[in-house]
Amino acid sequence: MLGKAVLKLLPFVGLALAQSPSYVDPDNGITFFGIVDPVHSVTYGYVFPPLEANRDEFIGEIIAPIDSKWVGASPRGGMLNNLLLVAWANGDSIVASTRLATGYSLPGLLEGPVLTTLPSSKVNATHWKWVYRCQNCISWETADGTVSLPVDGSGAAAWAWSDVEVTEPANPASSFSQHKDFGFFGVDWSEAHVSSELYDAWAAGETGGGPGPTPTATTTAVPTPTVTTAPTPYDYIVVGGGPAGLVTADRLSEAGKKVLLIEKGGPSLGSTGGNYQPAWLAGTNYTKFDVPGLFETMFQDSNPFWWCKDINVFAGCILGGGTAINGGLYWYPPDSDFATANGWPRSWANHAPYTNKLKQRIPSTDHPSTDGKRYLMETYGVVEKLLRPLGYRDITINDYPNFKERVFGYSAYSFIDGKRAGPIATYYQTAVARKNLAYFPSTTVQHVVRNGSQILGVQTDNPYIGPDGFVPLTPKGRVILSAGSFGSARLLFKSGIGPKDMIDIVKKHATAGPNLPAEDTWIDLPVGENVSDNPSINLVFTHPDIDAYENWAQVWSSPRKIDAEQYVQNRSGVFSQSSPRLNFWRSIRGSDGRTRWLQGTARPGAASVTTEFPYNETQIFTITTYLSTGITSRGRIGIDAALTGRALTNPWFTDPVDKESLIAGINELVGSIKHVRGLTLITPDNTTTIKDYVDSYPTGNLNSNHWVGSNSIGKVVDENTKVLKTNNLFVVDASIIPSMPMGNPQGAIMATAEQAVAKILALRDGP
């Protein structure tokens, strides 16, 4: 089909249509390429010498309101192993440094780059401006080798911002707290070059270069399409190729419907056209996303193209969504996941037929290695000794989905044949093989086109999918949003559906505002509210039996040779599993009389360690403790002026009984340490209490990225998942789940999709 062929030639069409414009700084006459972030009103700009000069430098600037206590820029995008430029005002001067982060912690100084602050830098009563020359800044060295800025191509630059002062304002090496906000913007670096004559003059502090536009946060508005010109209507348009979207598209096409599946990202597994792999996988068809043992590198890579750039939390914009990049933990949903007590309509209670359909397509495994063996299991043995004195017993967890009271077992995954599988290797493969389904990747849906309550189609950024990017429905057609808790909520806002304060933000946006329907047709629904996510707390231990596996830091560039060779040979061994090795559950009755469930996940290694005592880093392991079903805290997600999806109210511990319950569960675990010879808790260590540790835990680190509820069933969608007050718009993804599932949610999400698509197909008056 046309969609399957054309998009292979246009993998970055969405990015290409969203590049940053050039502007001229009126103070110095320098032409920069960049943006004004509309949320914090900070300008970020870059300009380069000519490509043919092959020079390792650029000129940049940051202009920030005076309440910006520090601002960071990452030209290559992302935090890890990338050049970071950090600056702040100190009196009448600018203090700045180049830094490099090897983990999600305070980045250290980066040696090699040379910064020169240029004369047009200044501080006044309202703003500070840093204009700088950055030499030795196109390429830099990391533990994994040389990393370079793609000056002859395009990319997504990143920024970070905080209103909290640094510790030592006069010291370029000062420490500072975690950023309060961050974001990305597309840049065509190949266009951001000027002549050597101009560049050298600017680098020497000279001004001039001709008048030009001043920086602005506006972009060119996309005209509303004329829907009658669209040639290819579909019965169903499914927006989003994550776990719910893939299940939905497969079942609709299986039913003979004409289906269009649109995914914002590109390929993931090798079988889908992906090709991103480390050197040790050369000659295979396995990518980073195929190999379970590379899971931890999702958070360590200097080129994390799979993360969504328009959402302020980790979210996957790649085929498979979260199932392409998560740890693969996969739990068959218990009855409580669809119980009326947890917010579901009574008609959803009998989930077993739909869960069974899911299990037939994706059976779980707790021994994914092709030789049937389990590897790197020392963590399991130590944690088992911690749990048994507390009354826990071991079971095969997915054999007893409804039994979660003081049980533990081997971690279960959605892997097949030693590789990541989930819905990508199953539902997606059968869906794209059908002639009645068209698949368009690397395509962003901008909004739903509607006439009152009737949906006419969707507007995309891809001109190859339809005239001006518009795709219509057949006369009885339907649109199904499966873009996730943040993505689907934002699409509703941009389509004039949701709280007025969110739609007003869209209205003020230069590009999205003109495409809103008339205000008298806005639909007021609590989109973005009732959001929940597991609050999670990491406990880090040491034990002499543990093999921390170099904290997974070497698996990409220099893995243990025997393990890498074993995996390449037959997909067995350590790399056939992701990092989790054991999971456990128990119930906790809170002071409010409600029952909440504690889940634990144990794995070798640690994301971070905080202790005042020496420890053996080769013997560390982590137990992550979560609260799941029964939590009462709720938050709200929405958008900012840049239309970036973000949490407006964080969903963790808004009810103090949730925190009280989690602390009780952690204290019980810590109380059992005395039963395990050689076991030491190092984060937190014995200089603090568990209560103080949890009370001071960084808010952002509580995030489990298991967001549900932003389009809750019964509040935003009806029991058939149709958006209230519309005729033919549906939502099928994590956002309709009204409360936290018992475990990591991918199983519950796909079971939800199986039931939802059956209900949609059963409705009258459909295509």
Image (spheres, grey):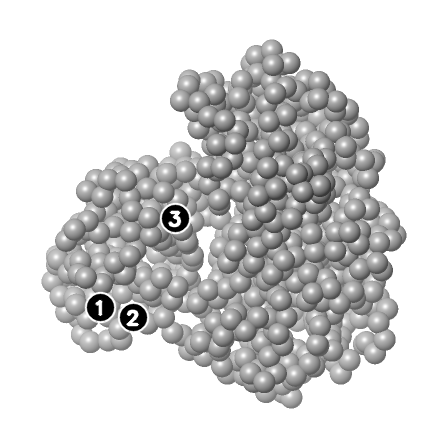
Residue 241's spot in the image, x, y percent?
66, 59
Q: Earlier in the sequence, mark 1 or mark 2?
A: 1
Residue behind mark 1: 25
Mark linked to residue 179: 3
- In front: 236, or 434? 236
Q: Residue at x 56, y 66 (%)?
A: 490
N-terminal of the two: label 1 or label 3?
Answer: 1
Which residue type does callout 1 highlight? Asp
Residue depicted at 67% across the width and 38% down the height: 590
| Residue 215's disc number | 2
**Mark with earlier residue (2, 3):** 3
Query: Alpha-carbon distance for marks 2 and 3?
Result: 24 Å
Q: What element does badge 2 sit on?
A: loop
The vertical placement of 331 against 118, above or below, is above
On screen, residue 745 versus residue 507, left or right, reads: right
Please state which amino acid type lies under the numbered disc 3. His
Mark 1 and mark 2 in contact? Answer it, CB < 8 Å.
yes
Q: Which of the two discs, 1 and 3, sits closer to the camera?
A: 3
Estimate the x, y position of residue 128 in percent, counting from the top left.
Answer: 22, 58
